[in-house]
Image (spheres, grey):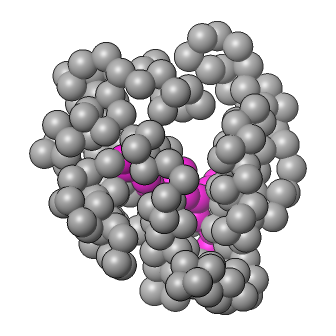
């Protein structure tokens, strides 16, 4: 079991600043992805159609002790374009999950996701001292699976009928993991690719 879920902190690089998620981010977040069914397609909640609905969804990750939530802020604009969280991983010692992540469509296929994952994984391994980072996604979300594999995630299994989707169908959940001794090679590869 995770000894203590880390508190959200400010982490930044040239592309993004991750900062503790607050209700002050909701206006930017709604502009980035509110009402966009494709952004929310694989998440566990229905697409928020108003800023108030998005604030209600945000309340879950801001106020729950199950999450350490970060707003994803673009360095060039200073605007929040999504959020990402650390979560506890029951049954695993010194393991933390990165999940409940979404980004507005405008930043898909940019350096944002990789930049966020590098910051969060570095912090988990190098600062907090975990030995495993877990990532999960819907078995139908092939775009997310490819992104997780690209950063170094190893497929560890699939949880069948893991949870219902908002539409009532069942989600099988694909589980990936990255170990602390695997990460330096992946990080070096990602850093080389970003500077090429």
Answer whether residue 45 is visible to the viewer in this image: no
Q: Residue at x 71, y 65 (%)?
A: 150
| Left or right, 116 with reference to 27 | right
| Left or right, 10 with reference to 136 | left
Location of residue 159 in the rendering, given as x and y in whole percent from the top left corner: 81, 39
Q: Residue at x 26, y 33 (%)?
A: 30
Q: Residue at x 48, y 32 (%)?
A: 39
Relative vertical location of residue 193 with respect to residue 168 in this rendering, above or below: below
Relative vertical location of residue 35 with respect to residue 96 in this rendering, above or below: above
Give the magenta part as a residue range: 82-99
| Left or right, 96 with reference to 116 | right
> Does the segment drawn in magenta span residue 35?
no
Q: Residue at x 55, y 78 (%)?
A: 194
Location of residue 98 in the rendering, given as x and y in whole percent from the top left corner: 55, 58
- Which quarter of the rendering shows the C terminus? bottom right
18 or 112: which is nearer to us?
A: 112
Q: Residue furthest top?
A: 168
Q: Residue furthest left?
A: 24
Relative vertical location of residue 122 with respect to residue 53 in this rendering, above or below: below
> Does the segment drawn in magenta span residue 86?
yes
Dominant secondary structure of the magenta stretch? strand
Location of residue 152 in the rendering, given as x and y in whole percent from the top left corner: 73, 70
Answer whether residue 190 is visible to the viewer in this image: yes
When asked about the image quadrant of residue 156, the answer is bottom right
| Left or right, 76 with reference to 180 | left
């Amino acid at each position: 079991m995770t000894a203590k879920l880390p508190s959200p902190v400010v982490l930044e690089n040239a592309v993004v600043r991750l900062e503790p998620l607050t209700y002050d981010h909701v206006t930017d977040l709604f502009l980035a992805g509110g009402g966009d069914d494709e952004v929310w397609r694989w998440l566990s909640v229905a697409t928020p159609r108003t800023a108030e609905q998005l604030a209600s969804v945000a309340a879950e990750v801001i106020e729950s002790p199950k999450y350490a939530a970060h707003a994803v802020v673009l360095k060039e604009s200073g605007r929040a374009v999504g959020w990402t969280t650390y979560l506890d991983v029951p049954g695993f010692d010194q393991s933390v999950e990165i999940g409940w992540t979404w980004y507005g469509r405008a930043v898909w296929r940019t350096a944002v996701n990789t930049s966020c994952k590098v910051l969060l994984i570095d912090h988990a391994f190098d600062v907090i001292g975990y030995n495993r980072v877990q990532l999960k996604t819907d078995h139908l979300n092939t775009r997310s699976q490819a992104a997780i594999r690209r950063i170094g995630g190893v497929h560890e299994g699939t949880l069948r009928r893991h949870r219902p989707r908002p539409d009532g169908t069942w989600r099988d959940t694909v589980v990936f993991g990255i170990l602390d001794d695997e990460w330096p090679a992946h990080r070096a590869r990602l850093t080389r690719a970003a500077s090429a």
